[in-house]
Amino acid sequence: MPPAGNEKPNAREIFRVFAKIGITSFGGGLVAYLRDALVSDKKWMNEEEFLAALEIGQTLPGLNSVNVAIIAGRKLAGPHGAVAAASGLILPGVALLLLLGLLYDRFRHNPNVAAALAGVAAAAVGLLLQVTLKIGAKQFLNLRDLCFVLGTFYLVAFHHVSLPVVLFLVAPIAIILCRPTPTKPDA
Amino acid sequence: MSDLVKILNVFCLLSLLAVGGGSAVLPQMEHETVTLHHWVTGDQFATIYSLGQMAPGPNMSMVALIGWQAAGVAGLLIALVAFYLPSSFLTYGCSYIWDSFKDNPWRDSVQRGMAPITIGLMLAGVHAVGKTACINPNHTTPFNTVTCTIALAVTGILFAKHINPALLMLIGGVAGWFLLRGH
């Protein structure tokens, strides 16, 4: 696939574009920011290239947004581009988190701050619940999927079954149940 | 084994197990950092998680704050590198060879099979932070009623309206300050 347009940027320019997203993306939804910047604004990738990167990013472990940054950075400027993209995306938020962490450490015993933080923490639980219900809507409505949703939830939340056990014992069962339909018998 | 090596081990493993985005590792992260290693308390974990949701950038950068609480600046750097580097290396390498297996029919099976497990893990993540942030046995019933109401209100509002979650969390903070000060 030919590159989508403009000539390839250097690592500094890549860092600048990703850092802008890293600074402004309050409240999440990073993939949409990435699409806007890479496809619509900078035209560094076309739509198909972006979707292919997203597909890889979603399939492999790691955060989708960071994985897309790695792939896009690599395509634009090799290893330097990948490092520039990922660090640009991650570091501004870390700097702000550090500041929030310092404030938290200093003021967490103040009853006003503690009350506000309890409200923020509760709101974050509500946000995660909403995201889970929204992206899981299809799975909740399918009986077999629902069994795996609830089974995984039950094992992990109440029996502290560890993540490696879930991924290496439960996941293969789920994957085999979803195996490609035109299977040919081994023989 | 020094704490730094433990931090490295824990977050490297979480990095490679972070399927379907970051939230799926939340229950395991809570178990490792609160119950096993006592780097943070359950309350701190829930707060640090919520700060991570408010800050811009990838929502799991809050691992930096856990590393920091565990072992200062060195812990912060190691947690961050350990959480992001292994999965990034994997992605970097796999993006070269992706084309050769993207049409493999098993890829679709893996995605369909993993989807409900990811959702189950995310629900367990809701439980992992909710058991201290919402239904906390150390708090009074009125306190827990308020926190549960805030959480469910946020869920409901997000379903009804497109609104920036960071803004909703600030509103949650104001509601908490207003309603929970006395407790």
Image (cartoon, coloured by chain):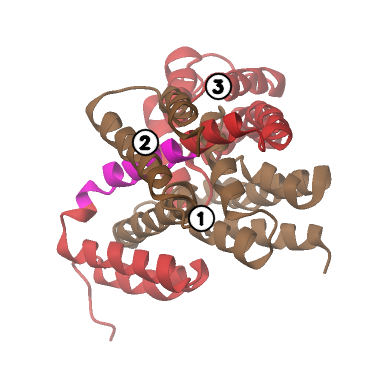
Chain colours: A red, B brown
Query: Which residue does the numbered mark 1 point to in the structure image?
Result: B138
Q: Nearer the viewer, residue A109 or B28?
A: A109
Q: Identify the amino acid type marked 2.
A: Ile
Q: Nearer the viewer, residue A102 or A77?
A: A102
Chain of the residue displaying label 3: A
- Up the image or down, B110 lies above or below B22; here it is below
Chain of the residue displaying label 2: B
Extent of the magenta region: A121-138
Label 2 element class: helix
Label 3 element class: helix
State whether discs 3 and 2 lie on one chain: no
Name the residue rendered at 70%, 29% in the picture: A103
Q: Identify the amino acid type marked 1.
A: Asn
Q: Nearer the viewer, mark 1 or mark 2?
A: 1
Query: Which residue does the numbered mark 3 point to in the structure image?
Result: A21
Distance between mark 1 and mark 3 Cα atoms: 39 Å
- Secondary structure mostly seen in magenta is helix
Q: Residue A131: where, in percent of width, then height? A: 34, 41
Distance between mark 3 and mark 2 Cα atoms: 29 Å
Q: Residue A99: where, in percent of width, then height? A: 70, 28
